[in-house]
Amino acid sequence: MASMARDLLAEHTLDSTLEQITRKAVELVDGCDASGILVLRGDRVSSLAPTAQFVVDSDRLQGRLREGPCFDAARPDRAERLFRIPDFTADPERWTSFVPRCRELGVGSMMGFLLYTREEELGALNMYSHKPGMFTEDSETAGWLLASHAAVAFSTAKTDAQLQDAIATRHLIGEAMGILMGRHQVTEDRAFDLLRTRSQRTNTKLREVARRVCETGVLER
């Protein structure tokens, strides 16, 4: 786990960080055959870094049914941080629509852990086994440890990605402003006003307006 934590923080992109998290879940948690991260954006479910197709299918099923352990773990309005279905062959006491349909995907047991830091809740780290009864208390402890490290790495990588995106956007806007200043002989403030006005009138993000100026050399009317 300590080695994994160092490896996670050494990753250079958000995608590679998430892929490392789910890959390590399979390697380090006893009984785990596949893993993925479920994220809720409003009411839309997204599957990040799944290690198998049935993980994506499970996430989609939970999103469609609006129920399931990982779906609940990713919801910010729930106080619970861990969900477990030890045996998909048993009659479900909870998630009665999800369990029989997920069983058809070849899932025998699963766990879901909320990924969170003090500042934010990021989604759910989910672990699956093809066989029932594979996740023990030791598996749960290992899952919690991994999820704790993963949440910090996820949050750090997310912040870095946002910062890099902001820098790229600023550079793009500055380049577009330079083109407009040279073409129309206007000041820096006026060039920015032209970009902003175009963005507002067309309901287009300022970054996209700037990108078009950089590509075409003109501000479309």
Image (spheres, helix red, strand yellow):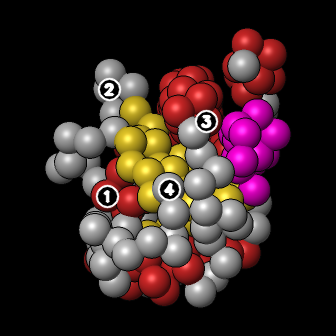
Mark linked to residue 86: 4
| Cα gap from disc 1 to disc 4, whole angstroms | 16 Å
The answer to whether residue 34 is magenta is no
N-terminal of the pair, mark 1 or mark 3, is: 1
Looking at the rendered image, the disc whose residue lies closer to the viewer, 1 or 3, is 3
What amino acid is labelled 2 in the image? Glu
Q: Residue at x 80, y 16 (%)?
A: 3
Looking at the rendered image, the disc whose residue lies closer to the viewer, 4 or 2, is 4
Residue bearing the label numbered 3: 139
Residue bearing the label numbered 1: 72
Residue bearing the label numbered 2: 119
What amino acid is labelled 1 in the image? Asp
Q: Secondary structure at mark 1?
A: helix
Judge left or right: residue 28 versus residue 122.
right
Majority SS type along the magenta span: helix
Q: Are marks 2 and 3 in contact (CB under 8 Å)?
A: no
| Cα gap from disc 1 to disc 2, whole angstroms | 19 Å
Looking at the rendered image, the disc whose residue lies closer to the viewer, 1 or 2, is 1
